[in-house]
Image (cartoon, rainbow, N blue to C red):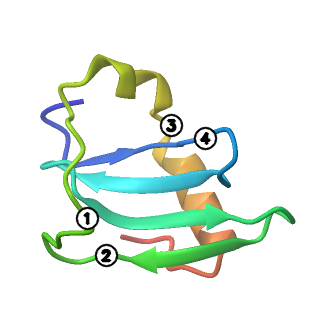
Amino acid sequence: MVGHDRVHMLFVEDDDPPMYPELDGDGHATRRVVLDGDGDGLSAELDGDWPFNPPFDLYDPDLTRMRIDADHCAAIWEKAGGNAAH
């Protein structure tokens, strides 16, 4: 995933709602959608290298299985009320 300007992911943990982050080329989340139990989403734009936004390791081979298509991520983002064009 290294070398891409944007990487779109789907993280699903056992007890947590699904999270759809968009990562920049350095691995920082630039925006994300978290779905609640009803399938509604809360979207957030994230700017900057904040302490609570540490970069993901784009060299980690385990992240590859969590990667999704940019169009899928854009559709989730739009449904959650975010701006699909980024």
> Which badge, 2 or 3, comes first in the chain's sequence?
2
Report the Cα–Cα distance between label 4 and label 1. Answer: 18 Å
Q: Earlier in the sequence, mark 2 or mark 4?
A: 4
Residue drawn where x is 57% and y is 67% of the image: 77
- Residue at 54% across / 60% down in the picture? 74
**Mark 2 and mark 1 residues within 8 Å of each other at the beta carbon:** yes
Gap between marks 3 and 4 measured at Cα: 12 Å
| Residue type (three-letter) at the residue carrying disc 2 | Leu
Quarter of the figure with residue 85: bottom left
Which residue is located at x 69 percent, y 47 percent?
15
Q: Are marks 3 and 1 in contact (CB under 8 Å)?
A: no
In the picture of the structure, the residue carrying the numbered disc 3 is: 68
Please give the residue where the numbered disc 2 appears in the rendered image: 46
Residue underneath mark 1? 53
Q: Label 4: how many residues lie within 10 Å, few (<14), some (14-19) or many (20+)?
A: few
The amino acid type of the residue labelled 3 equals Ile
Q: Nearer the viewer, residue 80 or 42?
A: 42
Q: Is residue 15 or residue 26 the one in the foreground?
A: 15
Question: What is the secondary structure assignment of the residue under circle 4?
Answer: loop
Mark 4–mark 1 CB contact (< 8 Å): no
